[in-house]
Image (cartoon, rainbow, N blue to C red):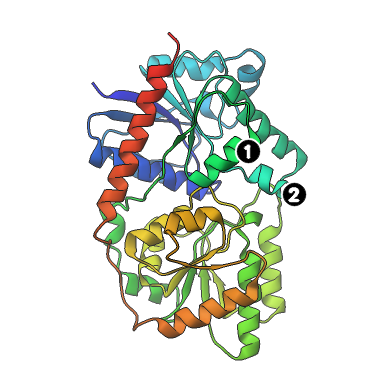
């Protein structure tokens, strides 16, 4: 019998990277560890069917809707009483063997082995981007999960160094699971040439599929385009993703206001939230991927670009160098001039427009991801006190 592993649904509009992470994880487990783990995804009664349907279509994934998983329901009880009783009751009903916590804490008395995923430590590295309350909640959540004896899961060696720096008193060694993307074959049937035409993009464009969080640093890309405009070099950056940043409302309007003030409306194009099949289509046909982020745990967009062999221009973070083994072009997070230089060189070196397919070693990376994750779950079960 497969181990039944509880997950909490992550709405795509709130955190696209988290949603894509779980989607890729479920697909990887289904393909490379069939019959070993059965993901049970708990969602609120009002969560979007359009988000849940693709996840429910992955073999072995079950979706359970319950009022116990609406918003932050149960958090107060988890903190004050040590247990989110409503969630625990649902776990019992669904015969759960272990629980995966992502931005969710079910209490120190949770009677199941639990794995807490810490995607990154940006609230410690970039505290100025967090309102005091949000920073405190995130830090308190991490510390409660550590104190509760959770198996901590990280996504990179870079995050592991941060973990040891920020939480030197943590008793247990964290597990590192580097994720890799597994695009659904159904997403790859969309014709990239048609998608490019649908959005009226030029044949050559750079792609920036990051949600408009402040730390994603779209501003440096706008500034680089302004430099290129002054030089008379024509480059187009196509951006997609949610415009919602609950920590700094109005950030998207601020970025787009600067785009207009610099006269870059035809050089920086925002498409909004687009279907995932269109994201992959634009990625496969772009000149290069740009990720200017100030903080990453292990970038989903970089993994997606690696899957198709897309050239990358990335902010010079340790994790970006770890993730690409030094094969991308890098620039400082506040250095639009170097980014502008990279855009020119990559554009000049690019061949005629093409549509890329999955790279040959793609399955090896995804299989390793699935294996490392499965080993982490079994470790959590093995060390859980009975």
> Is residue 25 something one can see in this rendering?
yes
Labels 1, 2: front one? 1
Residue 331 placement (x, y as % from top left)? 58, 68
| Residue in the foreground of this view, choosing between 314 and 272 | 314
Mark 1 or 2 closer to N-term?
Answer: 2
Mark 1 and mark 2 in contact? Answer it, CB < 8 Å.
Answer: no
The residue furthest bottom is 232
**Seen in the image, is 298 located left or right of residue 310?**
right
**Seen in the image, is 185 located left or right of residue 24?**
left
Q: Secondary structure at mark 1?
A: helix
**Which residue is painted at 42% across and 65% down in the image?**
327
Q: CA distance from mark 1 to mark 2?
A: 19 Å
Q: Residues within 10 Å of mark 1 (few under 14, many from 20)?
A: few
Q: Secondary structure at mark 2?
A: helix
Is 191 above or below relative to 370?
below
Residue 371 placement (x, y as % from top left)? 30, 37
The quarter of the picture where residue 1 lies is top left
Residue 380 placement (x, y as % from top left)? 41, 23
- The residue tagged 1 is 165
| Residue in the foreground of this view, choosing between 151 and 289 | 151
> Is residue 44 something one can see in this rendering?
no
Number of marks in the rendered image: 2
**Which residue is painted at 33% across and 24% down in the image?**
4
Is 218 above or below relative to 92?
below
**Seen in the image, is 2 located left or right of residue 103?**
left
The residue furthest top is 386
| Residue in the foreground of this view, choosing between 4 and 67 | 4
The quarter in which the C terminus is drawn is top left
Q: Which mark is residue 128?
A: 2
Q: Residues within 10 Å of mark 2 (few under 14, many from 20)?
A: few
């Amino acid at each position: 019998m497969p181990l039944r592993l509880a997950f909490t649904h992550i709405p795509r509009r709130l955190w696209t990277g988290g949603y894509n992470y779980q989607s890729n994880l479920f697909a990887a487990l289904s393909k490379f560890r069939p019959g070993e783990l059965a993901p049970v995804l708990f969602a609120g009664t009002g969560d979007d069917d359009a988000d849940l349907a693709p996840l429910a279509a992955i073999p072995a994934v079950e979706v359970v809707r319950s009022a116990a998983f609406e918003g932050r329901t149960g958090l107060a009880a988890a903190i004050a009483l040590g247990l989110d009783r409503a969630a625990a009751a649902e776990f019992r009903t669904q015969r759960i063997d272990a629980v995966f916590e992502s931005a969710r804490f079910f209490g120190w008395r949770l009677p199941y082995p639990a794995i807490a995923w810490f995607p990154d430590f940006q609230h410690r590295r970039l505290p100025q981007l967090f309102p005091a309350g949000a920073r405190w909640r995130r830090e308190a959540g991490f510390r409660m999960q550590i104190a509760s004896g959770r198996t901590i899961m990280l996504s990179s060696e870079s995050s592991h160094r941060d973990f040891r720096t920020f939480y030197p008193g943590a008793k247990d060694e964290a597990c590192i699971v580097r994720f890799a993307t597994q695009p659904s074959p159904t997403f790859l049937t969309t014709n990239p040439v048609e998608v490019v035409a649908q959005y009226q993009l030029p044949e050559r464009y750079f792609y920036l599929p990051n949600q408009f969080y402040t730390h994603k640093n779209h501003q440096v890309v706008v500034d680089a385009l302004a430099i290129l405009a002054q030089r008379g070099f024509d480059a187009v950056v196509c951006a997609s993703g949610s415009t919602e940043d609950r920590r700094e409302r109005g950030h998207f309007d601020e970025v787009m206001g600067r785009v207009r003030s610099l006269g870059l409306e035809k050089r920086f194009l925002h498409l909004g939230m687009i279907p995932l099949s269109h994201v992959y289509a634009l990625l496969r046909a772009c000149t290069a991927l740009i990720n200017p982020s100030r903080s990453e745990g292990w970038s989903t967009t970089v993994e997606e670009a690696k899957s198709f062999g897309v050239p990358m221009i990335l902010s010079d973070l340790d994790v970006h160098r770890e993730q690409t083994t030094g094969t991308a072009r890098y620039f400082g997070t506040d250095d639009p001039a170097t980014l502008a230089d990279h855009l020119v060189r990559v554009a000049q070196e690019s061949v005629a427009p093409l549509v890329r397919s999955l790279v040959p070693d793609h399955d090896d990376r995804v299989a390793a991801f699935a294996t490392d994750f499965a080993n982490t779950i079994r470790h959590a079960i093995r060390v859980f006190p009975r």
